[in-house]
Amino acid sequence: GWVRHDEEDDVLVYAEGGRDDVEALIAFLRQGAAGARVDAFEVEETKPEGHEQFAIRGVSAGAFVVQEHQATAHHFDLRLEVEGAMRSWAVPKGPSMDPAVKRMAIQVPDHSIEHNDFEGKTGGGWVRVWDRGTYEQGGRVPWPEALERGHAVFVLHGERLKGGFALQRTRGGEKPQWLLIKRLD
């Protein structure tokens, strides 16, 4: 199942299981942790339609930034905050909002979080912030294990990039190659 805080300030919970499981969840919500009890809620039985795209939802994972980088070759750097560092991928053609377009993403060394705001000249060109925001974990495997396994699903909440994305490792080695894919929302 999943838990999500929606735009109308409601908390949505999707749970799978039998009647006993649902009753246990309702009891937990009523009892709740100190200061977190839910006084009013509705239970609606639904039939899931299609594949549940995100099994872990609404789990804030931290910041993301995309920096446009004019160096030897023009590219974009996608950076996702994971365990106190910014995991980084060079995306030569930049991210796409079209689910039919898969972009190559080459994993590069992690950066510090302090680097997220950097704009200006570098040794071989310039850098500017192209997009920034927060992101949520997605998929059925928690982070950073999902990255270690080579398939990570996430939801971006940026100014330009919004919605579900996936990183799929296609080649390991010294500079692992990935595909950055926009998911259907």
Image (cartoon, rainbow, N blue to C red):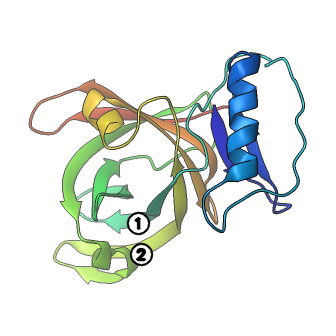
In the displayed structure, 143 sits above or below 78; it is above
Which amino acid does the dot numbered 1 rest on?
Gln
At x 43%, y 46%, the residue is 93
In the image, residue 157 sits, relative to residue 4, either above or below, namely: below
Q: Nearer the viewer, residue 8 or 91?
A: 8
Residue kind at label 2, given as amino acid type: Arg
Q: Which mark, residue 57?
A: none
Which image quadrant: the C terminus? top right
Please give the label number shown on residue 128.
Answer: 2
Question: Badge 2, how many Cα within 10 Å: few under 14, some, many 20+?
Answer: some
Residue 54, above or below 3: above
The image quadrant that residue 97 belongs to is: top right
Specify whether 33 is left or right of 26: left
How many numbered dots are placed on residues in this image? Answer: 2
| Image-quadrant location for residue 54 | top right
Picture residue at 86% right of the left edge, 61% below the top: 8
Q: Tell me, yes or no, if residue 98 can be seen here.
A: no
Residue underneath mark 1: 67
Q: Where is residue 38? Give x, y as percent.
A: 77, 56
**Residue farthest toward the left in the current orientation of the protein:** 174
User: Sequence order check: which comes first, mark 1 or mark 2?
Assistant: 1
Asked whether 133 or 4 is in front, the reply is 4
**Alpha carbon distance from label 1 to label 2:** 6 Å
Do the numbered discs 1 and 2 sit on residues whose CB atoms are within 8 Å? Answer: yes
Q: Position of residue 158 (x, y in %)?
A: 60, 63
Measured as percent of width and height from the top left, residue 84 is found at: 28, 65
Q: Residue 56's quadrant in the figure?
A: top right
User: Measuring 41% from the left and 75% from the top, which residue is drawn there?
Assistant: 128
Q: Residue at x 80, y 18 (%)?
A: 49
Q: Is 139 displayed left or right of 157 in the figure?
A: left
